Image: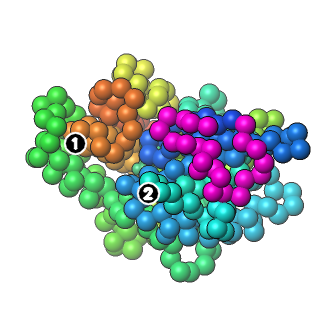
Amino acid sequence: MQTAEFDIKKVSRNFQMPGRLVKARRLGYGHINDTFLLIFERNKSLLRLVLQRINHHVFKNPVALMANFERILTHLHAIWSKPGSFLKPLELIPARNGKPLHHDDDGNYWRSYLYVDGTSYGLPDKGSIAKSAANIFGRFQCDLSDFPSPRLNETIPDFHNTVKRFKYFEKVCEKDPANRASSAKREIAFALQRKTSASVLIDLQKKGELPERIVHNDAKLNNVIFDRKINHAVSIVDLDTVMPGLVLYDVGDLIRTMTCTADEDERNLSKVSMCMSLFKSIAMGYLSSASGFLTKCEREHLVFSGKLITFEIGLRFLTDYINGDTYFRIHRPDQNLDRCRCQFKLVESIETQEKNMRKFVDSLA
Ligand code: GN1
Ligand code: MG
């Protein structure tokens, strides 16, 4: 079974697979890893599995990453698989050698897990979806709050360090390796105007006002699986960046990916804004599972995190555009610039509604 560049059938033979492979296709919309859905047949019944190639240029130590994966899943299984729980932690399929990874002859790292049956969304079509997704991330953070030592490996160091991201952006602008800075003048100016916001959370963490916790770090709506029947979030996928961080990194991504009225790379910017009613659903959903452990400072920065993380990702798309598209997978020219423009438009929309967003969070106290 050959899908694009990979011989999936050959790769799958290195895992403890449950029967005969009958179908394979690409899955999902990730910008980094390569993900495939595999269907196996055994005793006339069909079983679905996910096979993923970890991008080892981005995740430089896949072995340390999978060590995290196993520890996190063991911990979640003990809580989520209790009778009466409808939450479904991922279940890894080991490689033939018993390890959680297969390292192939071309240097690629592969892993596999059972496909979680359900639906995922690009944008929430109703408030209940946003509420349920925000709720499961609060629950995820809460259930990992007593995670035993040692500290999890940092799969990408300084992943949400916006100050370092900003320094790198300035360096890339100066070098301008693909000669593109002149076509992104307005976006560069937009970023420079907001430079001071980059250090707010990092400074509070340094002062000891924001605690380090274990967080997902990529809390996008499309990383949540919903049960079709109960229309409730039942699982969280894409655990590569689960590591120490601030809960606000997840809240920020929830706001970024669920309040936006258009896709992440929407070119018609008049379609892009922050939807207040979806924000309210997120705040209610998240606080219903997280308010028990949040500190006052974390709570006070929920809205700010939405603005900051949207800005940070916009900045990363812009940096990658100027760099010649070396990090995020693109499907058309200028897609990273379009992604950046859309994020920056959302930042502006949050800026104009920030006061009301904060008022709403305060009203939930
Ligand atoms: C990347 O590949 P995906 O979609 O899971 C990126 C995230 C960004 C996101 C933007 C490791 O995630 O940080 O928020 O794109 N992941 C990595 O959509 O850089
Ligand atoms: Mg991801």
Query: Which quadrant is the N terminus positioned in?
Result: top right
Residue 316 at least partly seen: yes
Instruction: Assign a secondary structure to mark 2.
Output: loop
Q: Which residue is mark 1?
A: 323
Is 309 magenta? The answer is no
Of the pair 321 and 82, the residue shown nearer to us: 321
Query: Which quadrant is the C terminus positioned in?
Result: bottom right
Q: Is residue 266 left or right of residue 88?
A: left
Mark 1 and mark 2: Cα distance apart in space? 25 Å
Q: Amino acid at mark 2?
A: Gly
* Residue shown at the point (39%, 38%) measured from the top left: 329
Quadrant of residue 228 in the image? top right
* Residue shown at the point (86%, 40%) measured from the top left: 45
Q: Amino acid at mark 1?
A: Asn
Q: Which residue is mark 2?
A: 107
* Residue shown at the point (86%, 57%) measured from the top left: 84
Disc 2 CB within 8 Å of nearest ligand 1 atom:
no
Bounds of the magenta segment: 1-22
Residue 135 rendering spot, x and y as whole percentages:
65, 49
